[in-house]
């Protein structure tokens, strides 16, 4: 999808006069007018929170094949070295011959002068490379596919971003209590804001002793920008997978989940252990051992390290063990630990998205993680399975959208009154569809749905692109009960051999400790043509979803996952 962006100037920390600084964001002039201006009570807390959001923006933990360019460069250097040795030998021989002919010898300080000028050259070359990395828009677009989104709401201002690897979503809520006095000339709405590496560097200059204002600058909307020297226009091509992942995680945040309260020391222990240790085998998960009336117990696999939370007791109805993957993305929370008052985690289920909320007084940071670091078929299919009982209604979607657009925020009970004739599953299904289209966001702390258009329009199916037929049919097969599990066997290394009949087709496979296929076999046409290169066929996918949902192995405490 092609997205048009127009900015007047650049975002940055500017001098507002009188010893005051202003964090000035340049809004996207191609969208509706949005503005905000108020003084921050705690600039350092805002600095650290925005720095954590930056870690989400540039996050990319996707697997990459081994890079042999360094070895090839070493071989080229060796060849150059040999050529240099030959050249130096030739030069020495030439100098000897010149001396014999009575010519002047080379200056005695020639080598020292050469090294000094060579060092000066490389210093300026490195400075130029760093400057290019900070200010080259084309290079920056390879790092950040889309600029962050800022929404000015009646009670809060919040910034949203989505990681390049399509697996992490970050949102920073800054309530009006975080500002001194009321906002001057606030215009409610949502827009993109100019973002760059240089802006992140500017954030690091914020200090407690220097008054700071948060400014979503409205001047670009108030002047005739045509022909302005600092008007910049960008056209970026957002891939369908990025858009689909953004809406998918948004929709996941509003689904029913288990709420777990964690103390700051528990999150610190997770990050400290992961910082010092690197796993070599799977499973690479965090297992939440949940027992009603007791604080959660977290187990870091494969080491079996137990972390006991000192926070409130789990309020669920039954004992459970839930695994979440992609834990190294939690490093984005590291800078928030000194300011955090506590953490809340929303767990949708094993292998499904998890939402981590850091509470920092009038600010809160939301970090939503997809089930796997690679936002692939597995996480998307399992998520749709979870939402399979929800039903959507076109009239309800339109009515709920108009109500939220007018009121800006509403609880589920209030939204149910908008369409009183519809049952709860239709209301939730309609809200689920609006979230996938990028039209709303769910605020856990306030317990409300907020109107927020991530794009200037709803993300239709034509924009997101068609879903894989194998994923769609695999979900249908698993949901309809067409999978008949025949055999499951625990193998070495915590792997599982599974065999099942899907409809009239027999298929089998080996699941690794993280729940993915390492080997598979099916007699369908898709598998015979592609194997596992394009992902599992519909039958293997249905078998995997069924086994992971109903036949997960017990944990050390005997609780079912």
Image (spheres, grey):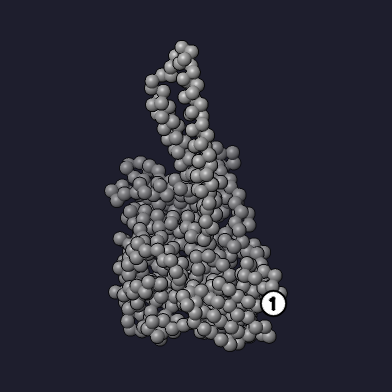
Q: Identify the residue at horizontal 40%, vertical 43% (top origin).
A: 14
Q: Residues within 10 Å of mark 1 (few under 14, many from 20)?
A: some
Give the x, y percent position of residue 502. 64, 83
Q: Is residue 275 visible to the viewer in this orientation of the structure?
A: yes
Residue 239 percent coordinates (x, y): 61, 58
Residue located at (45% from left, 71% from top): 282
Q: Which residue is pictured at 33% across the width and 83% down the height?
A: 293
**Is 250 drawn above or below residue 45 in the view shown?**
below
Identify residue for label 1: 524
Quick one: 73 or 304, which is closer to the camera?
73
Above or below: residue 546 compared with residue 381: below
Give the vertical position of 67 relative to 88 (above or below): below
**Residue shown at 64% from the left, 62% from the top:** 463
Indicate the quadrant where residue 339 lies. Answer: bottom left
* Spot occupied by residue 536 in the image (x, y as percentages of width and height): 62, 72
Name the one closer to the observer, 400 or 383.
Answer: 383
Query: What quarter of the picture does the N terminus occupy?
Result: bottom right
* Mark count: 1
Figure quadrant of the C terminus: bottom left
Left or right: where 115 falls relative to 375: left
Secondary structure category for the residue under label 1:
loop
Give the quadrant of residue 337.
bottom left
Q: Nearer the viewer, residue 390 or 535?
A: 535
Instruction: Work out which residue is located at the far right of the displayed protein and give it.
Output: 525
């Amino acid at each position: 999808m092609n997205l048009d962006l127009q900015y007047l100037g650049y975002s940055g920390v500017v001098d507002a006069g009188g010893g005051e600084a202003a964090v000035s964001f340049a809004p996207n002039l191609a969208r509706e007018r949005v503005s905000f201006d108020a003084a921050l009570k705690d600039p350092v807390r805002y600095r650290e929170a925005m720095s954590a959001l930056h870690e989400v923006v540039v996050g990319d933990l996707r697997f990459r094949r081994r890079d042999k360019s360094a070895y090839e460069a070493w071989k080229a250097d060796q060849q150059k070295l040999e050529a240099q040795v030959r050249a130096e030998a030739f030069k020495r021989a030439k100098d000897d011959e010149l001396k014999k002919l009575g010519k002047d010898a080379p200056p005695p300080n020639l080598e020292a002068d050469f090294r000094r000028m060579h060092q000066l050259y490389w210093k300026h070359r490195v400075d130029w490379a760093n400057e290019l990395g900070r200010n080259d828009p084309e290079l920056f677009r390879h790092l950040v596919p889309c600029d962050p989104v800022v929404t000015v709401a009646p009670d809060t201002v919040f910034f949203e971003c989505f990681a390049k690897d399509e697996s992490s979503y970050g949102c920073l809520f800054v309530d009006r209590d975080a500002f001194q006095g009321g906002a001057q000339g606030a215009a409610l709405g949502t827009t993109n804001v100019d973002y760059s590496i240089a802006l992140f560097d500017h954030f690091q200059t914020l200090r407690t002793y220097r008054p700071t204002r948060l400014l979503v600058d409205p001047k670009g909307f108030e002047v005739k920008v045509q022909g302005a020297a600092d008007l910049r226009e960008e056209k970026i091509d957002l891939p369908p997978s990025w858009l689909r992942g953004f809406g998918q995680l948004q929709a996941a945040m509003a689904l029913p989940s288990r709420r777990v309260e964690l103390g700051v020391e528990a999150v610190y222990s997770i990050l400290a252990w992961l910082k010092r240790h690197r796993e070599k085998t799977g499973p690479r998960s965090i297992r939440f051992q949940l027992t009603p009336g007791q604080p959660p117990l977290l187990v870091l696999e494969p080491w079996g390290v137990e972390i006991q939370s000192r926070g409130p007791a789990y309020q669920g109805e039954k004992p459970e063990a839930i695994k979440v993957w992609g834990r190294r993305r939690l490093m984005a929370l590291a800078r928030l630990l000194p300011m955090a008052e506590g953490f809340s985690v929303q767990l949708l289920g094993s292998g499904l998205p998890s939402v981590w909320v850091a509470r920092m007084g009038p600010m809160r940071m939301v970090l939503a993680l997809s089930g796997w670091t690679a936002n692939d078929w597995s996480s998307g299919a399992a998520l749709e399975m979870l939402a399979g009982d929800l039903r959507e209604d076109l009239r309800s979607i339109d009515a709920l959208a108009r109500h939220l657009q007018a009121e800006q925020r509403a609880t589920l009970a209030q939204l149910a009154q908008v369409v009183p004739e519809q049952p709860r599953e239709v209301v939730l299904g309609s809200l689920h569809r609006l979230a996938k289209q990028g039209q709303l966001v769910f605020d856990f702390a306030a317990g409300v749905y907020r109107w927020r258009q991530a794009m200037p329009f709803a993300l239709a199916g034509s924009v997101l692109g068609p879903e894989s037929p194998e994923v769609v049919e695999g979900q249908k097969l698993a949901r309809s009960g067409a999978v008949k599990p025949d055999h499951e066997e625990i193998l070495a290394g915590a792997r599982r051999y599974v065999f099942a009949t899907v409809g009239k087709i027999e298929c089998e496979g080996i699941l690794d400790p993280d729940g993915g296929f390492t080997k598979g076999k099916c007699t369908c046409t898709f598998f015979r043509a592609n194997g596992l290169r394009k992902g599992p066929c519909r039958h293997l996918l249905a078998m995997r979803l069924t086994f992971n949902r109903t036949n997960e192995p017990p944990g050390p405490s005997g609780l079912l996952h």
